[in-house]
Image (cartoon, rainbow, N blue to C red):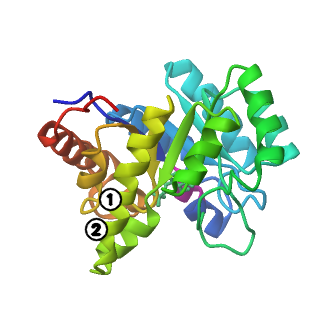
């Protein structure tokens, strides 16, 4: 049996609902408290440049809350000077660098680390110097994985969006996307990178990803916040945790990379 997977809960869309009306409810910090009580291993939040969901004040509150609880905050950020300064001010446990386009509905693709080497490498260095663990959100592409190692990241988070969409839509490419994720995880671990995964995961798609032996953390948000409307956040997280743990227990242990 492989090691227990960590589950990070992305609470961005609690803020999306709050912002639909303005005001202060529902409060992302309250969601974070509930998530931690339900067995989450950490909280993820993306402070987008346009502040469409999480606000600067949310990040401040989440940094205080997670520090008090001794649990990690994973700060998702675009590779900009503004976001770097905010990360350096709050010093979260981890920063996950993501691509960002204002017109996108969500983070649509992985970071092009190979092309962006000269911009990304100094940001990675500054964050690491401040003691922040740096993760890069990348597609399951061997060139991007190598580039992630070359810019000095400690972690890659593999983008599971294309795989999840293909499963949900019943498209045959799902198997190919899953194999690419498996290969990327093995490659990254072989290069000494820690491997995370996330985006678009739900009860149906989480199992095969949780079963990839090199993956040590999943970050899941939108589906769980939606499911919380029907079953409550704690129940949704507990069910996700169970599905992850079952898939992990049934998976073969990691073989030497
Ligand atoms: N990981 C990263 C890097 C993301 O950008 C997101 C979405 O903000 C997630 C994980 C979570 O994706 P979802 O909300 O679809 O579960």
Residue 46 visible within the image: yes
Label ID, residue 175: 2
Q: Position of residue 62 (x, y in %)?
A: 61, 35
Residue range of the region highlighted in magenta in the rendering: 11-15
254 lies above or below 68? below
Quarter of the image for residue 179 reads bottom left
Under circle 2, the secondary element is: helix
The residue at the point 73 percent across, 67 percent down is 101
What residue sits right under mark 1 in the picture? 179
Label 2 close to label 1 by CB (< 8 Å): yes
Q: Nearer the viewer, residue 168 or 222?
A: 168
Residue at far right of view: 81
The residue at the point 26 percent across, 48 percent down is 235
The residue at the point 39 percent across, 58 percent down is 180
114 lies above or below 134? below
Q: Quick check: is 7 in the magenta stretch?
A: no
**CA separation in Å, label 2 and label 1:** 6 Å
């Amino acid at each position: 049996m492989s090691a227990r997977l960590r589950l990070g809960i992305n609470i961005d869309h609690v803020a999306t609902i709050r912002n639909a009306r303005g005001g202060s409810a529902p409060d992302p910090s309250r969601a974070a408290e509930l998530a931690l009580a339900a067995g989450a291993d950490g909280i993820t939040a993306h402070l987008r440049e346009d502040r469409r969901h999480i606000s600067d004040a949310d990040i401040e509150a989440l940094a205080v809350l997670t520090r008090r609880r001794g649990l990690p905050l994973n700060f998702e950020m675009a590779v900009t000077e503004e976001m770097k300064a905010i990360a350096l001010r709050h010093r979260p446990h981890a920063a996950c660098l993501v691509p960002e386009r204002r017109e996108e509905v969500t983070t649509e693709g992985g970071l092009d680390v190979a092309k962006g080497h000269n911009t990304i490498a100094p940001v990675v260095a500054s964050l690491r110097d401040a003691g922040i663990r740096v993760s890069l959100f990348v597609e399951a592409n061997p060139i991007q994985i190598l580039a992630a190692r070359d810019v000095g990241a400690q972690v890659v988070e593999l983008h599971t969006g294309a795989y999840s969409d293909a499963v949900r839509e019943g498209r045959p490419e799902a198997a190919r996307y899953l194999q690419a994720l498996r290969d990327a995880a093995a490659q990254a671990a072989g290069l000494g990178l820690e491997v995370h995964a996330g985006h678009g995961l739900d009860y149906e798609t989480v199992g095969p990803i949780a079963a990839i032996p090199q993956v040590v953390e999943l970050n899941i948000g939108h589906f769980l916040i939606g499911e919380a409307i029907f079953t409550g956040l704690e129940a949704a997280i507990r069910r996700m945790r169970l599905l992850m743990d079952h898939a992990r227990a049934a998976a073969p242990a990691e073989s030497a990379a």
